[in-house]
Image (cartoon, grey):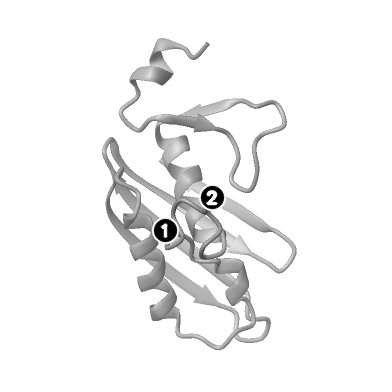
């Protein structure tokens, strides 16, 4: 049974995990739930969610592709704004010209204040490098 804190958090709660459920089936709430949901939307392929086929940026699919960093920033910001908990979003993409790797810094203004996180996807994995609250 969820604690009353989780049930009353204005940002909601969810099972932990960005790519898959946490093996312990633990819960996250508040900003962490908001962060994981937002990161999942940036990393999952477009159409991965049957009930929301327009969701998903597929950031890892763009590695090594020819694209403009400003285009990725705009697409990332629009994806972040799909979450009703997000009031505003600002993304900054840095692309390594030699490897095609992307580092995406995302600033979110949410219902309970701002936070920043950094994603660095590779062909093998996507890492959450930093979270600043």
Q: Nearer the viewer, mark 2 or mark 1?
A: 1
Q: Kindly indicate the quadrant of the structure image that contains residue 63.
A: bottom right
For image coordinates 71% across by 69% down, the residue present is 123
Q: Nearer the viewer, residue 54 or 61?
A: 54
Q: Nearer the viewer, residue 39 or 102?
A: 39
Residue 75, above or below 129:
below
Hey, which residue is sitting farthest right in the picture? Answer: 124
Residue 132 appears in the rendering: no
- Mark 1 and mark 2 in contact (Cβ < 8 Å)? no
Q: Residues within 10 Å of mark 1 (few under 14, many from 20)?
A: many
Mark number, residue 128: none
Residue 64: percent from left, percent from top: 64, 82
- Give the left or right position of residue 108, taking residue 129 as reference: left
For image coordinates 31% across by 43% down, the residue present is 85
Q: Which residue is mark 2?
A: 130
Residue 29: percent from left, percent from top: 45, 29
Residue 53: percent from left, percent from top: 46, 60
For image coordinates 50% across by 85% down, the residue present is 67
Residue 112, above or below 24:
below
Q: Which residue is mark 1?
A: 106
Residue 23 appears in the rendering: yes
For image coordinates 68% across by 81% down, the residue present is 99
Q: Which secondary structure, mark 2?
A: strand
Q: Earlier in the sequence, mark 2 or mark 1?
A: 1
Could you tell me how far apart the alpha carbons at marks 2 and 1 are, in whole angstroms?
10 Å
Residue 15: percent from left, percent from top: 56, 31
């Amino acid at each position: 049974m969820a604690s009353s804190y989780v049930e009353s958090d204005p940002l909601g709660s969810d099972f932990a995990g960005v790519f898959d459920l946490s093996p312990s089936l633990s819960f996250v709430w508040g900003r962490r739930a908001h962060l994981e949901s937002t990161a999942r939307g940036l990393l999952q392929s477009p159409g991965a969610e049957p009930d929301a086929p327009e969701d998903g940026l597929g950031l890892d699919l763009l590695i090594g592709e020819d694209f403009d960093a400003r285009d990725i920033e705009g697409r990332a910001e629009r994806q972040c704004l799909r979450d009703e908990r997000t009031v505003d979003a600002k993304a900054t993409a840095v692309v390594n010209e030699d490897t095609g790797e992307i580092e995406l810094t995302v600033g979110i203004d949410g219902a309970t204040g701002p936070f920043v996180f950094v994603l660095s996807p590779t062909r093998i994995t996507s890492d959450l490098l930093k979270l600043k609250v």
